Amino acid sequence: MGAEADISFEGGRKFIPSSDIAVKENIAGIKKILTKTQADVYLLQELSAGSLLNRWNNIRKEVHETLPCHTSSRVSNFQLPLFFDFLKNEHGMGTFVKDSFNVLKKQIRPFKVSEYYYKIIPRLDFALTTFVETPSGKTIAFVNTHLSSFDEKGVLRMSQFLDLMTYIKKLAKEGHSVIAGADWNLHAGKFHFFGKDEAQYEKYNHDFPYHLLTNGWTAHFPNDVPTLRAANRPYIEGKSTTATVDGFICSPDITVECVNTLDLGFKHSDHNPVEIVLSC
């Protein structure tokens, strides 16, 4: 969903948020950013293999072709098992690691609870972990996840968060450095409401639980530019609700040099990408 998109699920006008031309332009823009940034590791969410909502464009395939020198791991959060290909609907997460690093293995761990779209269609939520050996012989566990979003009291999100913290602390005890990157759907800082949006979104507004990070674990969010925009109307700078929900949790042995939002003005996605530079 680029800046042109709005969707009925969030109170917008459209069931299908964008035209086919717009979706193709957004995919091209995403591919351009992936090529330009040349990161060692990408943690991507909502990689669709094609659905009615994105005019059956296979974004996952396009990303794979754009990152040929990266080893990939993936998992589907949502897959509708229909007999006819034109009705397919699948999306999930993907982690891409530059081939100069040695990928040892991947691990897919389901959360104990997950959300339902429209209260009837299950979305399975996971922690997708890729274990990477650095040239120095150290092992880093890159954890890619995407927490629940539209549970009014935040019960699902907090359950998933606590589940994740138990899991990543176990990884650290096993001797791995840990970097967990996510769309947390938990707000680091203020939710910047526009107009009457506060009444619509306030019930979903839950803060990131910094107090649950103990014993040297740290959270890192950009503080300059928001990472998410509301999709109840097309994006207009200064006239759209925005928030910061995308960032990282790091184990105590990780040194973070900087974390920044790539300010793309939500041109090709309802999220701005976030970049972290670190050493361990």
Image (spheres, rainbow, N blue to C red):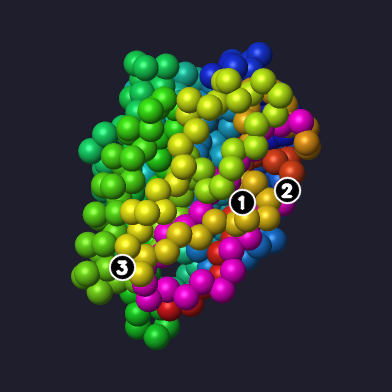
Q: Are marks 1 and 2 in contact (CB under 8 Å)?
A: yes
Q: Which mark is residue 136?
A: none
Q: Mark 1 is on which residue type? A: Pro
Residue 258 within the magenta-colored segment of the rendering: yes
Q: Mark 3 is on which residue type? A: Asn
Residue 246 within the magenta-colored segment of the rendering: yes
The residue sitting at the front extreme is 211
Q: Which mark is residue 215?
A: 3
Counting residues from the start of the chain, the first of labels 2 and 3 encountered is 3
- Gap in Å between the C-alphas at discs 2 and 3? 35 Å
Q: Which mark is residue 273?
A: 1
Counting residues from the start of the chain, the first of labels 1 and 2 encountered is 2
Regarding residue 143, the answer to whether it shows in the image is no
The residue sitting at the bottom extreme is 136
**Quick check: 79 above or below 268?**
above
Residue drawn at the location 64% of the way across and 17% of the way down: 12
**Quick check: 247 above or below 159?**
below
Stretch of the chain drawn in magenta: 239-264
Residue drawn at the location 65% of the way across and 31% of the way down: 193
